[in-house]
Amino acid sequence: MDPITVIATASAAYNALKKGIAIGRELQDMGSQLATWAGAVSDLEFLAKKAENPPWWKVGGNVQAEAVEIFAAKKRIQAQRDELKTYIQYSYGQSGWDELLRIEAQVRKRKQATEHRREEMKELATTIVVVTLVVLAGVAGLALLAFILWSAQQK
């Protein structure tokens, strides 16, 4: 999951929503596009939260570049949200906008419970592996040093 993929997904769903609204489709009939767009928004929020507190082994310029991408994507999503609000309120009234917000909240909760949790678990597993390898390398280095010192004393 990266910001570029997320914004591409959101933009595709957003364009489909705009076309559907323009031709007069009912909001309920565009449920998959709404869910896709809301899912991308949720993914972007998750990425932004992760970028604020990256793991210690992921420090550097890559994190800063990702933060800039996320910032730009958040601005683009906000512009899409504002435009969707205008379209939906104009076409379906406030109840249509309220429905979109409800769908978005449902998708966000579902993603937090499944996909985002899975992503957090993968990151935790990676951190555990990295820490284990560092500790094992340190122990091996100390064992090698002890062996070299012991060998030097035996001569």
Image: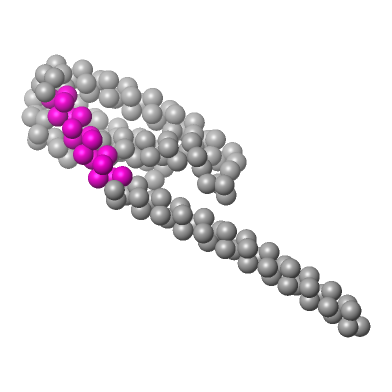
Kindly tell me whether residue 82 is visible in this rendering.
Answer: yes
State the scheme by which the image is colored: one colour
Judge left or right: residue 124 versus residue 115: right
Q: Furthest-right residue in view?
A: 155
Q: Which secondary structure dominates the residues rendered in magenta?
A: helix
Which residue corresponds to the image point at 72% horizontal and 67% vertical from the top-left? 141
Quarter occupied by the C terminus: bottom right
Horizontal and vertical percent position of residue 37? 25, 35
Q: Does the magenta stretch include residue 107?
A: yes
Judge left or right: residue 126 versus residue 148: left
Which residue corresponds to the image point at 84% horizontal and 80% vertical from the top-left? 151
Horizontal and vertical percent position of residue 67? 49, 34
Q: Compared to 119, does 3 lie above or below?
A: above
**Residue 26, picture quadrant:** top left
Q: Is residue 36 magenta?
A: no
Q: Compared to 120, does 130 lie above or below?
A: below
**Residue 30, picture quadrant:** top left
Tell me which segment is drawn in magenta. Answer: 96-112
Which residue corresponds to the image point at 39% horizontal and 45% vertical from the top-left? 1
Which residue corresponds to the image point at 56% horizontal and 58% vertical from the top-left? 130
Q: Compared to 57, does 90 lie above or below?
A: above
